[in-house]
């Protein structure tokens, strides 16, 4: 099991027979024990051993059946029809109405159980990432334009504008614009609050946002992290172009938000089984940067950059656990072996099931010295 994705456990401790404790700076690797200067101590103490084992037992495990940080109490419930209907989400992405898409989801998120919103332009400009790019007058014009589009084109809101005061926004029922919006109690999917609070609605491309919502939809529909459906089926179901699905999912994979496991080609691509998608969930970008900085401080920028370069070929460049694993492989097996494995993997197509970290590790460990010359 992994530990909690938000807490980095870095214990280098060995407990033998509930009595002997060895603890120190060394990684438990051949390189650390034979080629590095390290410090460690051996302590015979059943009390200390018991205390350490109790502490390890209390570490919160990353449960495989749940994505990271998906609190249903704070998540936003959105009607499934927003994604399934050609008149709403699908129409927004095919019409490239990204700001209308972002703004409508923010309206739902901030409205909560209500249908009426006291609309503060400055607040929404911040959430949309417009406050640093435009003057107040400019972003008010752009937001007003998007609000009017949500009203006239998609019939999802009613509006009242007031000079010098906040606007009034009333959410409308998605199926009947004459009725007011009510918070969905059934046939909905959940979007984690981290999508808005961590700024992912600003960081992701439009296609990867939509594909993230598809993963949330499938997670809630199937009740599990993993699901499988062909790109063609996804395209028909969610009113998207096939290439939009493929590119959006691969962007999420590179960001370590989802994982994709492609099926092997047995006879032909036409008979190939669909890929399996796994929702990993969202992480805090600031905490991610701190983890990257910690790896750089511990191993050096040059080594970290080499690990990132290798990780890119297996789509794990934003997985700090994978980066540290690759760093240890570099230190143990040397750069020539890592570079050769990179060459072998990079020749495979993007959807080749062998473009995965565990397969790359197998290549690194199985290479012979004569193959590196």
Image: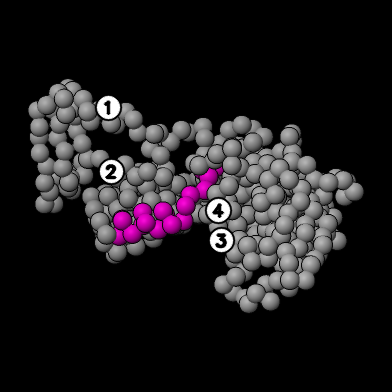
Say which residue label 2 marks: 10
Say which residue label 3 marks: 203
Q: Is residue 177 above or below residue 92?
A: above
At horizontal 66% and vertical 51% (from top left) the residue drawn is 110
Residue 271 horizontal side relative to residue 15, left or right: right
For the residue carrying disc 2, how many other residues have a C-alpha within 10 Å: few (<14), some (14-19), or many (20+)? few
User: For the magenta stretch, what is the residue range?
Assistant: 272-296
Across and down, in percent, residue 207 comes to 65, 57
How are the colours assigned in the image? Answer: one colour
Say which residue label 1 marks: 54
- Secondary element under disc 2, as helix, strand or loop, is loop
At horizontal 83% and vertical 57% (from top left) the residue drawn is 158
Q: Which mark is residue 71?
A: none
At horizontal 86% and vertical 61% (from top left) the residue drawn is 152
Across and down, in percent, residue 168 comes to 77, 59
Labels 4 and 1: the sequence-earlier one: 1
Q: Is residue 124 magenta?
A: no
**Residue 166 or residue 284, whichever sits in front:** 166
Labels 1 and 2: the sequence-earlier one: 2
**Mark pair 1, 3: CA separation:** 40 Å
Q: Which mark is residue 197?
A: 4
Marks 2 and 4: which is nearer the front?
4
Q: Quadrant of the N terminus?
A: top left
Would residue 214 be visible to someone looking at this image? no
**Circle 1/circle 3 CB separation < 8 Å:** no
């Amino acid at each position: 099991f992994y530990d909690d994705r938000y807490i980095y456990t870095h214990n280098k401790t060995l407990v033998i027979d509930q009595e002997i404790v060895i603890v120190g700076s060394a990684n438990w690797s051949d390189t650390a024990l034979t080629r590095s200067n390290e410090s460690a101590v051996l302590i015979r103490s059943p009390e200390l051993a018991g205390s350490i084992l109790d502490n390890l037992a209390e570490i919160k495990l990353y449960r495989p059946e749940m994505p990271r940080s998906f609190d249903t109490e704070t998540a936003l419930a959105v009607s499934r029809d927003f994604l399934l209907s050609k008149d709403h989400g699908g129409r927004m992405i095919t019409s490239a109405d990204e700001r209308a898409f972002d703004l409508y989801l923010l309206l739902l998120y901030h409205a909560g159980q209500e249908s009426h919103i006291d609309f503060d332009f400055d607040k929404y400009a911040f959430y949309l990432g417009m406050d640093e790019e435009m003057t107040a007058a400019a972003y008010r014009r752009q937001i007003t334009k998007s609000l009017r589009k949500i009203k006239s084109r998609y019939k999802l809101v009613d509006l009242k504008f007031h000079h010098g005061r906040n606007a009034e926004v009333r959410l409308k029922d998605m199926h009947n614009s004459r009725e007011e919006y009510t918070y969905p109690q059934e046939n909905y999917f959940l979007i984690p609050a981290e999508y808005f609070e961590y700024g992912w609605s600003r960081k992701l491309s439009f296609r990867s946002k939509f594909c993230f919502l598809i993963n949330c939809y499938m997670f809630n529909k199937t009740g599990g992290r993993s699901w499988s459906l062909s790109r063609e089926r996804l395209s028909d179901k969610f009113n998207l172009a096939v290439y939009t699905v493929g590119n959006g999912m691969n962007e999420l994979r590179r960001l370590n938000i989802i994982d994709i496991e492609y099926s092997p080609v047995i006879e032909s691509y036409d008979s190939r089984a669909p890929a399996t998608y796994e929702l990993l969930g969202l992480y805090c970008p600031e905490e991610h940067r701190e983890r990257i900085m910690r790896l750089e401080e511990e191993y050096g920028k040059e080594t970290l950059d080499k690990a990132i370069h290798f990780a890119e070929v297996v789509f794990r460049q934003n997985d700090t656990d994978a980066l540290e694993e690759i760093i240890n492989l570099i230190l143990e097996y040397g750069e020539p072996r890592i570079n050769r494995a990179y060459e072998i993997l990079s020749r495979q197509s993007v959807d080749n099931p062998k473009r995965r970290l565990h397969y790359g590790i197998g290549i690194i460990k199985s290479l012979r010295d004569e193959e590196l010359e």
